[in-house]
Amino acid sequence: MTTSAAQAHHSTVDITLEDIGHGGIAIGRAEGKAILARFGLPGERVRVALTEERARFARGDVIEVLGEPSPYRQAHPWPEAGPGGVGGADLGHVVFDYQHEWKTRVLTSTLRRIGGQALSDHLETQGIVPAVTALESDRANGGWASRTRIDVTVTAGRFGMFREGSREVLPITSMPLAVKEIAELGLWDGSYLTRLARSLGPLRDGQRVRVLAPSASPAAVSIGGRTFDAAAAECSPFAREEVHVGEETYRYRVRASGFWQVHREAPATLINLVTRAAGVEPGDHILELYAGAGLLTVPLARAVGATGRVESLEGARTAVEDARANLRPYPWARARTAAISARDIDDADILLADPPRSGLGIAAGRGAAAGQARRIVLVSCDPAALARDVAAMVEAGRSVESMRGADLFPNTHHFEVVTALR
Ligand SMILES: C[S@@+](CC[C@H](N)C(=O)[O-])C[C@H]1O[C@@H](n2cnc3c(N)ncnc32)[C@H](O)[C@@H]1O
């Protein structure tokens, strides 16, 4: 690895990396300061180009391995996302089989650091060993070509992504995390933009573009509220998704610009983890917070049956419209638009929440714990928020029954954890 032109002006520091932290960083020390370095691995002696210096810590990118590289290092398969490049694959330099160990270490240490000793002791008493597991389907190609949604930005007649930690858009020539249906659109050689410009006229710099490859409808591009097919002809704004779980098939319509889990196998994996954790019985009343277009609401509605009841709350009005369409076969399930707060925690047999990165929050966590729910299921995409939310519920008298992490974001530092409390 060598210094890129973009980093040549940064000062550098030589350190030995000793630990791993949340956010895709390996940690070392220099002159009493913690150095939080991307693209490093514990045990390596490295040169770090500093990108941010604070009183007690500094951040930077590893630009050279000075000694023996870690046995877990690989050449980054997507150099444009390497040091000084676009974000989006900050664990691309880590061999696939070590990425879930990395994430398990982050999960365990974050639970201890943010959740406190009381939470760690509680998990131990409950016999819970938190872990993040890789998806079987990712083993064959190391988790690349797995994303069905990517967001790009127009810059000077090309598609680009933001330089990590900056608002500068760098044009890109590939995006190997995307599934092959996206790769086949011709986004990077300019051919798709040429077709699109015939329908839409020239695109302005800074225009945000969503590219998607749904499971049950053709790949599409969503831009400025309009949706285009592979030939760049305007098409339906709705993507069709089909999720197969065991014998069941769940069908959804999802607005092309709306939220849907990005990994090809994420919808089925989450349905599996959540339904197992929730232990739904026919006739149950379920309250679901942050429901999106109803990915989890549909299987839960099927599981409670006509004698049960599901209420789902979601902030995005268009997602609620999709959820209502997806729930039409289950009139006992109702989707409502709400800016969710602790006030929305109501009594139910099962409370399910899949909040954004900020998590449930302490007030909502305490409210959930104090309610009558037989079981609370929390889906967390940020380990710090997870630790804070679960600690609040345990402190309020709940017990953790299960905690399972899944690597739904290979080659990045992100992962998802499903926790059940009773
Ligand atoms: C992680 S997604 C989960 C969606 C769904 N469970 C799924 O897997 O497709 C979180 C959802 O929370 C919604 N959301 C974020 N902040 C919100 C808020 N303050 N109030 C209500 N909904 C919110 C987003 O629109 C998004 O649909």
Image: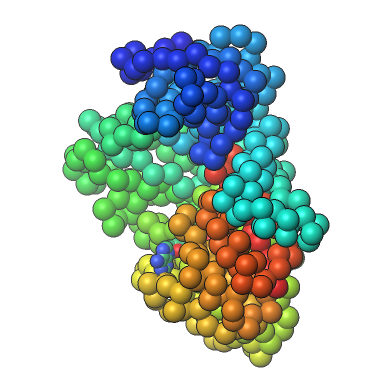
Residue 59 or residue 30, whichever sits in front: 30
122 to 48, vertically: above or below: below
Q: Is residue 281 left or right of residue 235?
A: right
413 to 273, vertically: above or below: above
Residue 371 or residue 57, whichever sits in front: 57
Q: Is residue 166 left or right of residue 93?
A: left
Q: Is residue 250 visible?
A: no
The residue at the point 47 percent across, 54 percent down is 357
Give residue 141's position: percent from left, percent from top.
65, 33
Residue 203 or residue 128, whichever sits in front: 128
Most distant residue in the front direction: 32
Q: How is the image coloured?
A: rainbow
Q: Is residue 157 left or right of residue 221?
A: left
Q: Quadrant of residue 231?
A: top left
The residue at the point 58 percent across, 14 percent down is 45
The residue at the point 63 percent across, 43 percent down is 109
Answer with the quadrant where ligand 1 appears in the image. Answer: bottom left
Q: Quadrant of residue 347?
A: bottom right
Check the picture and name the quadrant holding the C terminus: bottom right
The residue at the point 34 percent across, 13 percent down is 8
Give residue 127's position: percent from left, percent from top.
81, 57
Q: Is residue 69 visible?
A: yes
Give residue 157's position: percent from left, percent from top.
24, 32
Give residue 407's position: percent from left, percent from top.
63, 45
